[in-house]
Image (spheres, rainbow, N blue to C red):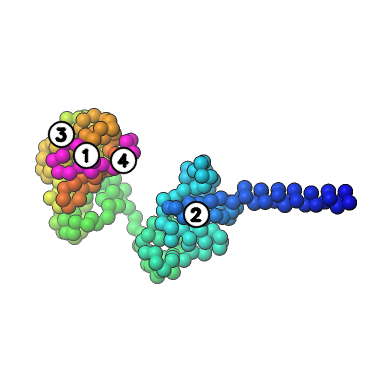
């Protein structure tokens, strides 16, 4: 009787141990409020992907809830998780737009084979590859896509890091006109905080009048540079680094809507600000 009782205890302990191991091998993935559960080994069979790489996915781990959280598209993720569980089969859900599905595949870094599989299923043609020019200005000109401004094309090259924006193209035709040397259209080539200077300029946008709005990173301001102007106008920030409504801290990018409202990625303040025309502070 003692032996029989001992065997039951051993079996119960083994089942408990097996259950604990199974739980340890399972992870929960929260996609915008919807939870999915799968085995770690299922994901880690694809170590080059975001979810399959332990070091990369740890940045999305919530210690309190013991789950991984992603603010991504729910419908797409069902197909992406099935990619892991089915050993590489991928199919776009019927109600998910193709561009959204491709964005999610790229975000989770499923790789070129997965993208090629979708392109084949969707009958998409491969983009013809071309050799880029060796000249730096011409090379970046080739890399810039056609803008949404219709026939007005003004493509800039903000690469110098010393406060210069160089114009590559400014033509009213549906083609690119490439030149070997850039034309300075904003800044002086010397970093600084004067009205005609920039300091570590980053993102920029151009409106239909060819006015340039520039994220002047180290000066924590947005400069508006009209076509042909010798200096820019500060239209947002310019009051030093800070968290106040009239300040920014390392603005990285800028966008302008058709009404002249300015939207700024205020990087080190971890916020996006909106400045209406002629405003003295943002919201």
Closer to the camera in the image, 130 or 270:
270
> Would residue 239 be seen by someone viewing this image from the given angle?
yes
x, y (%) of residue 110?
47, 56
| Secondary structure under the numbered disc 2 in the rendered image | strand
Distance, label 3 to label 4, CA atoms, is 27 Å
Locate the C terminus and report the quarter of the image it occupies.
Answer: top left
| Secondary structure under the numbered disc 1 in the rendered image | loop
x, y (%) of residue 150?
18, 59
Of badges 3 and 4, the one in the foreground is: 4
Magenta stretch, residue numbers? 267-283
- Number of labelled discs? 4
Q: Residue at x 23, y 47 (%)?
A: 255
| Mark seen at residue 196 | 3
x, y (%) of residue 268?
33, 35
Q: Assess disc 4: are there few (<14), some (14-19) or many (≥20) residues with their C-alpha within 10 Å of its C-alpha.
A: few
Q: Assess disc 2: are there few (<14), some (14-19) or many (≥20) residues with their C-alpha within 10 Å of its C-alpha.
A: few
Q: Assess disc 1: are there few (<14), some (14-19) or many (≥20) residues with their C-alpha within 10 Å of its C-alpha.
A: some
Q: Residue at x 66, y 48 (%)?
A: 20
Dot placed on the residue nearer the N-terminal end, 2 or 3: 2
**CB atoms at circles 1 and 3 under 8 Å apart?**
no
Relative to 105, residue 162 above or below: above
Q: Tell me: 13 left or right of 268.
A: right
Distance, label 2 to label 4, CA atoms, is 27 Å
Residue at which label 2 appears: 35
Q: Tell me: 55 left or right of 259.
A: right
Q: Assess disc 3: are there few (<14), some (14-19) or many (≥20) residues with their C-alpha within 10 Å of its C-alpha.
A: many
Residue 233 in the magenta stretch? The answer is no
Q: Residue at x 22, y 57 (%)?
A: 148
x, y (%) of residue 185?
16, 42
Residue at which label 4 appears: 271
């Amino acid at each position: 009787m003692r032996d029989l009782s001992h065997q039951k205890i051993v079996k119960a302990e083994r089942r408990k141990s097996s259950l604990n191991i199974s739980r340890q091998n399972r992870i929960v993935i929260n996609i915008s409020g919807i939870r999915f559960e799968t085995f770690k080994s299922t994901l880690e069979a694809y170590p080059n992907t975001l979810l399959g790489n332990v070091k990369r996915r740890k940045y999305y781990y919530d210690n309190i809830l013991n789950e991984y959280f992603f603010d991504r598209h729910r419908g797409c993720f069902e197909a992406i998780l099935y990619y892991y569980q089915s050993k590489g089969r991928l199919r776009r859900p019927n109600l998910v737009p193709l561009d959204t599905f491709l964005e999610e595949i790229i975000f989770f870094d499923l790789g070129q084979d997965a993208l090629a599989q979708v392109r084949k299923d969707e009958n998409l043609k491969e983009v013809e590859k071309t050799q880029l020019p060796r000249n730096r200005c011409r090379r970046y000109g080739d890399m810039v896509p056609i803008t949404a401004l219709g026939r007005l094309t003004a493509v800039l090259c903000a690469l110098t890091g010393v406060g210069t924006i160089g114009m590559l193209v400014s033509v009213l035709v549906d083609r690119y006109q490439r030149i070997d040397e850039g034309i300075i259209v904003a800044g002086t080539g010397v970093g600084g905080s004067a009205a005609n200077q920039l300091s570590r300029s980053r993102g920029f946008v151009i409106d239909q009048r060819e006015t340039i709005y520039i994220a002047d990173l180290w000066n924590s301001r947005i400069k508006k540079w009209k076509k042909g102007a010798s200096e820019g106008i500060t239209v947002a920030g310019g009051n030093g680094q800070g968290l106040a409504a009239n300040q920014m801290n390392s603005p990285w990018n800028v966008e302008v809507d058709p009404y002249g409202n300015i939207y700024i990625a205020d990087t080190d303040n971890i916020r996006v600000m909106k400045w209406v025309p002629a405003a003295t502070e943002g919201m």
